[in-house]
Every structure is written in structure tokens, then in C-alpha cells.
Amino acid sequence: MIPRYTRPEIGAVWTDEAKLESWRQVEVACAEETEGPTESDLEAIRAATFTVEAVLEREKVTDHDVAAFVDVLAASAGEPGRWIHYGLTSSDVLDTALALQLRKAGEIVVRGARGYRDALAEQARAHVDTVCVGRTHGVHAEPTTFGVKLAGFAFEADRNLRRLEQAFDQAAVGAISGAVGTYSATSPEFEARVLARLGIRREDASTQVVPRDRHAELLQAISLAGAGLERFATEIRHLQRTEVREVEEPFRAGAQKGSSAMPHKRNPITSERITGLARVLRGYAQAGVEDVALWHERDISHSGAERVILPDATIALDYMYALATRLASGMVVHPERMRANLDITYGALFSQRVLLALVAAGRSRDEAYRITQEHAQRAWDSHTPLRDLLEAEPGLGLDLDAIFDLGHYTRFAGEIVGRLDGLR
């Protein structure tokens, strides 16, 4: 991932240095459980070092990154280095080390997912009674509250949090099972001891690699979490339009510039950035699915893609969560504009209340619908309040105070938003 979108903590998980260090941890754990090395040998192996530069230089000769790493590490250990990589195949190291990196990345991403969810929940509670219009197809539907709207995003964020927890957990498994997964040079007991040292679970049948459906599941969960962030970002982008202006992104007045040419602009750039990166995550998820089908016990067609998509996907999602949390916490809400927008259809959005009242008064549904639709359209088209049009026809026998009471739409808002208290 480019530096612009890489936050330091998760970026450190995916450096070349960090990758090779995870390889070293696996090699050392295996040596410690191998029968043969003396304690003196193990001390030398534990003290063995590498540099990224030395490994890259050696790879020019071996044309094999793990072999180059083993050569460098073994040379650093001296004669005891012969026990490094003893009985192992490359994927034993690569996949087990990848599990260690995914576990670290998962801790960071899940923390960000929880912070985003909690920020939405806090704002939902703050705006439980902030009345606004609900929209379907982009058109005014019925009144709701901004708190109810945000509660929906918060519950979605919680579902994505749970999916990410599960996806990272199931992907962080290791395998020390040898060339085609038969333990021909080791044993299941050896694998169990090594993985216990590393604190990860085993893959039950690893062939030579950990099956890639696990990584595909993780990338799907990341993609879905990105889609949830995009949905929230899209909502903010729509609400920030000049014609709507019910919500705005936080803006640093006096410092931030919305446009290089038009000083008046305050653009939803954070939301748009989230939207763009969500598209990238969906592409990574597709690549992850295509990595599942490997030839027989193993090929490396997945390897080149994973070197890009796993670091980039976790780094991008971490960055997106940071943006979305800042957006959720700092968004500027305009309740007065929300109330003003409720009136731009001249009360037509109360049409269902009128329809139901007419049916309850004895009209057939078709007749009630026709009467209501006619008056609602006339209100909108003539800029005449719907209530005034209905008052002009006393024969309808309607309780207009009850029909046009906003409280009817918001009376369960507290109960809906209160369900957030069940989140953990």
C-alpha cells in the first residue's frame, strides 16, 4: 500500500523486516523442538541474525526467497546453523509466519472496527430525537430521526466487527507438515509443539500449504467491512450536498482548503476517499477467491497475489476505519436544516397517515389511496400545505392534529436506539 494510506502501526506489521522476523521466529521454534541440536546449538540459533539487504543479495543467487533467508540465517549461526530449516519445506515457514502477521494485523483492524462502531453508537444516542426525513430511491419518504439512521449503521458496523474477528481467527493457523503435508520428515507431535510455542492453531490437513479458502474468507470479510464503510460514506456525501446540507464532514476552518480554485468549497473528500478504497478492497476479495484453486498439493500461483493483497487489504481497511471514525465522531449535524427539509414537500410525506385514517374512517383502500395521492400531488405541485388542502374538505372527517403529529414517527426511536446497549 502506498505511504499515503499506511498508518504506522499496521505498516510495521508488513515491512520486509517484519516478514523475515516472523520467518526467523518460526525457524527458531522448529529448531527448539528438533531432536539433535544441543543447548549450545540452540543458543547460537536463537542469536542468529539477518538483514533484509543480505537476504536480497543472496536471493540473486538462489532465486528463492526462503532458501536465501535460510542461507543467511544459518551462516550467522555458524556450525549449529545446519539445524535451521531441518525437515521443513518453504511453505511450513511461509504459511505459519503469515499466520503470525495476520494475527497482529487482525488485532489492529479489529480495534479500529470497534472504535468506529462505538463512535456511531455514541452519535446515535446523541441524536435519538433529532428529526429528519427518511429517503427511499433518493426521494422523501417519511420522517425518522438521525439517531435511528445512525443506529442502523452502528449495528452494521458491529456485524462487520464480528465477521472480522472470526475471519482473522480462522485464517491465523499454521502448518509444519512437510513437503506434501504427510509429516514425512517430522511428525504431528512436532508440529503441535512448534505451534504451541508460537501460540497458533494447526491446519488439520495442510497438503503443503494452508488451504486458501481461509485467506479468501478473510478478504471477503474485509471487502464487506469496506462496503459498510462505503455505505456510511455515501450517506454523508448525499447529506452534504448543497441542496440538502443536513450533515457535513468536519472541516478545519482557516487551514483546510476544499478546492484549489474555489475558496468557498467544503467537499466531502473523506467520504469520497473511503468510497474509492472500498472499490479496491472488492478487487482484492476477487483475487483471494481466485487463489483458492491450486494445482494438486501446492503451486505458487497464489503467492504473487498474496504478497500484494493481504498487506494492502489490511492496511487499507485500517486507514478507512480511522477516516470513518473521525468522520462519525466529528461530523457537523444541522438539525434546523433537517426540519426545514421536512417541509419542502408541503406535508406530502404524511400521505400514509392520511391514507390509513381514510381507511379507518370507512373508505376502501383504493378510494383512500386515490384521494390521498391526489391531494399529496397537489400540495407538492402547488406549494400548498397538504393540511390546508385537507382542511378545505371537512367531509373527509379526519383528525388532522393526529395525522400531522411528528411524534407518531419518532415514538419508538428511543427503543430502537436503545438496542445498541446490547452490543459488547
Image (spheres, rainbow, N blue to C red):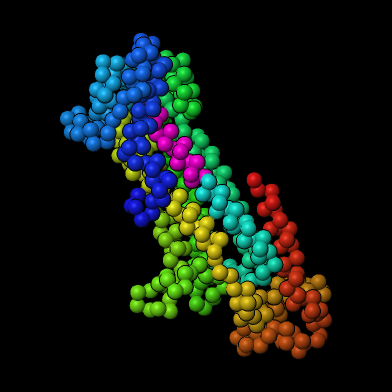
Q: Tell me the magenta residue range.
A: 92-110
Left or right side of 290 for 373 = right
Question: Which residue is pictured at 70% across the width and 78% down the height?
Answer: 372
Q: Quadrant of residue 346?
A: bottom right
**Magenta run includes residue 109:** yes
Q: Quadrant of the C terminus?
A: top right
Relative to 209, say whether 320 is above or below.
below
Residue 45 included in the magenta stretch of the image: no
Image height of 227 relative to 26, above or below: below
Q: Residue at x 29, y 16 (%)?
A: 80
Counting from the top left corner in percent of width and height, residue 112 is at: 51, 49
- Magenta segment main secondary structure: helix
Q: Is residue 323 visible?
A: yes
Q: Residue at x 54, y 75 (%)?
A: 245
**Percent x, y of residue 333:** 58, 70
Estimate the x, y position of residue 157 in percent, counting from the top left: 56, 52
Q: Nearer the viewer, residue 91 or 7?
A: 7
Q: In the figure, is residue 38 to the left or right of 410? A: left
Q: Residue at x 82, y 81 (%)?
A: 397
Left or right: where does residue 243 sit relative to residue 303? right
